[in-house]
């Protein structure tokens, strides 16, 4: 009989306790980084052959294209901050769909930025901290559930003074806030489930 792996494991009231049970390198692992580089190469091949980037790689970015198009009715260019934006698939997808002047900055963990140094997209600025620069649009897709002190990070958005802060794939609802471990990329990664309040 085939063993079924659990996606979630444990129920913790705070991040510190969950960290004691953390295992593996998570988003610092070679497996995660190599997967990101392979996806990037597939996307670049599609672009070179004038094909659309696969929907499975762009699904998380699709819902905000209409918002970006509306902003661009008033502006000639767009300055986007992508928190947890990985290697930059979102940037490639936006360029494919919008074809306007886009300035794109990604916030990622320093170890990830270092390991992808040879595969960075030249037009993207990669940073490890939110700065006090003004951005038109902030994208937070599937990232805040992994941030130990997410409240502090959200407060940093006041530095940005953006008109749009977009959350997608956020694990939140009318539930009690708790932390669990996500079995993901051969790791056990602390992961928030948040109350909307």
Image: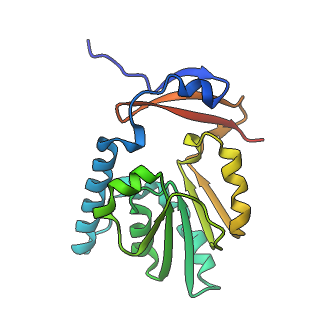
In percent of the image, x 33 and y 61: which residue is there? Answer: 117
Residue 173 in the image, given as x and y percentages of width and height: 68, 38
Residue 68 in the image, given as x and y percentages of width and height: 57, 73
In percent of the image, x 48 and y 55: which residue is there? Answer: 108
Residue 123 in the image, given as x and y percentages of width and height: 40, 75
In percent of the image, x 65 and y 42: which residue is there? Answer: 149
In percent of the image, x 66 and y 51: which residue is there? Answer: 153
Q: Quadrant of the N terminus?
A: top left
Q: How is the image coloured?
A: rainbow
User: Is residue 166 positioned above or below 185 on the image?
Assistant: below
**The furthest residue to the top:** 1
Residue 189 in the image, given as x and y percentages of width and height: 48, 33
User: Is residue 19 positioned above or below 102 on the image?
Assistant: above
How many labels, in total? 0
**The furthest residue to the bottom:** 76
User: Is residue 62 positioned above or below 74 on the image?
Assistant: above
**The furthest residue to the right:** 197
Nearer to me, 104 or 127: 127
Q: Quadrant of the C terminus?
A: top right
The answer to whether 76 appears left or right of 173 in the picture is left
User: Is residue 125 positioned above or below 178 on the image?
Assistant: below
Nearer to me, 85 or 63: 85
């Amino acid at each position: 009989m085939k063993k079924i792996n659990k996606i979630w494991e444990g129920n913790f009231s705070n991040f510190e306790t969950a960290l004691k049970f953390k295992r593996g390198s998570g988003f610092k692992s070679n497996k995660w980084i190599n997967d990101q580089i392979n996806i990037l190469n597939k996307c670049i091949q599609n672009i070179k052959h004038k094909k659309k980037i696969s929907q499975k790689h762009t699904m998380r970015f699709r819902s905000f294209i209409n918002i970006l198009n509306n902003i661009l009715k008033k502006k000639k260019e767009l300055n986007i901050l992508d928190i947890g934006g990985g290697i930059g698939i979102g940037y490639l997808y936006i360029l494919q769909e919008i074809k306007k002047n886009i300035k794109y900055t990604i916030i990622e963990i320093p170890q990830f930025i270092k390991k992808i140094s040879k595969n960075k997209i030249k037009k993207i600025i990669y940073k490890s901290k939110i700065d006090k620069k003004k951005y038109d649009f902030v994208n937070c897709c599937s990232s805040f559930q992994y941030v130990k002190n997410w409240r502090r990070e959200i407060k940093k958005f006041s530095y940005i003074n953006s008109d749009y802060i977009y959350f997608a794939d956020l694990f939140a609802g009318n539930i009690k806030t708790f932390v669990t471990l996500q079995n993901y990329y051969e790791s056990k990664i602390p992961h928030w489930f948040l109350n909307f309040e």
